[in-house]
Amino acid sequence: MGANMGKNSSLLDALPSAQGTLHVVMLGLDSAGKTTALYRLKFDQYLNTVPTIGFNCEKIKGTVGKAKGINFLVWDVGGQEKLRPLWKSYTRCTDGIVFVLDSVDVERMEEAKMELIRTAKSPDNSGVPILVLANKQDLPGAREPKELEKLLGLHELGGNAHGSKEGGTHCWHVQPACAITGDGLHEGMEALYDMIQKRRKLAKINKKKIR
Ligand code: G3D
Ligand code: MG
């Protein structure tokens, strides 16, 4: 399944598309904190996680700022190396990508960068906004967003949410967070929502221009 799925069938297609619900997929290396973040967003509490084989999927409601009341359907896909080929089938037709990062694990930063760039450059994800969740900010030695931007080479992906343009098609934003306490998670979802809205507005304008 997954890696061998036909071009026209994805798990997302199998779901009834709830009106107004935004589809978001959480990616990132194993043990970055994706499942912890998902369940903290969902239940507002810490849940003990086990490594994800397959995926988790939950409906989340935005609580902060413009994203208040917005429904997100969030997919949390296993991050172990052998599962990564599956990411492709989840990221098709998604409104936004949350890339969860262990901000302490500098040893695996290059690996995270490779996976992020691979995801961003996949034609299916062209222009999909990316929220980088700089997780585990509670731990000593956690890198700051500015440094992570550099380590991940985010500028190669496109302008960030604040408008700088350096080629590439992606809007991105780095949000410092702690999935255990929940700090920064809803702020991150708001930033993602903001980028999704901007992209939609631009698409509308461009459509009008073509007419
Ligand atoms: P994954 O779904 O990305 O693979 P998990 O990652 O959510 O399973 O988390 C992996 C480990 O990181 C878990 O610890 C979890 O408690 C921890 N973790 C997640 N987010 C944070 C955070 O913000 N800060 C700290 N300090 N730890 C975090 P265990 O010990 O269960 O492996
Ligand atoms: Mg997991």
Image (tube, rainbow, N blue to C red):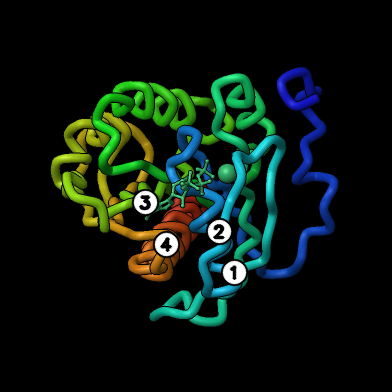
Amino acid type at circle 1 is Lys
Rendered view: 168 above or below 45: above
Alpha carbon distance from label 2 to label 4 = 10 Å
Q: Amino acid at mark 2?
A: Leu
Give me the residue at 50% from left, 34% from top.
Answer: 30
Residue at the disc numbered 1: 42
- The reply to whether callout 2 and callout 4 are in contact (CB within 8 Å) is no
* Disc nearest the viewer among 2 and 3: 2
Of the pair 152 and 21, the residue shown nearer to us: 152
Q: Which mark is residue 38?
A: 2
Q: Position of residue 78 (x, y in %)?
A: 61, 36
Q: Mark 4: which amino acid?
A: Ile
| Callout 2: CB less than 8 Å from ligand 1 | yes
Q: CA distance from mark 3 to mark 1?
A: 16 Å
Residue 129 is situated, as x and y percent measured from the top left of the image, at 43, 48
Q: Is mark 4 within 8 Å of ligand 1?
A: yes
**Residue pictured at 57% horizontal, 57% vertical:** 48
178 w.r.t. 144: above or below: below
State whether residue 174 is above or below residue 83.
below
Earlier sequence position, callout 3 versus callout 4: 3
Residue sitting at x 84%, y 58%? 16
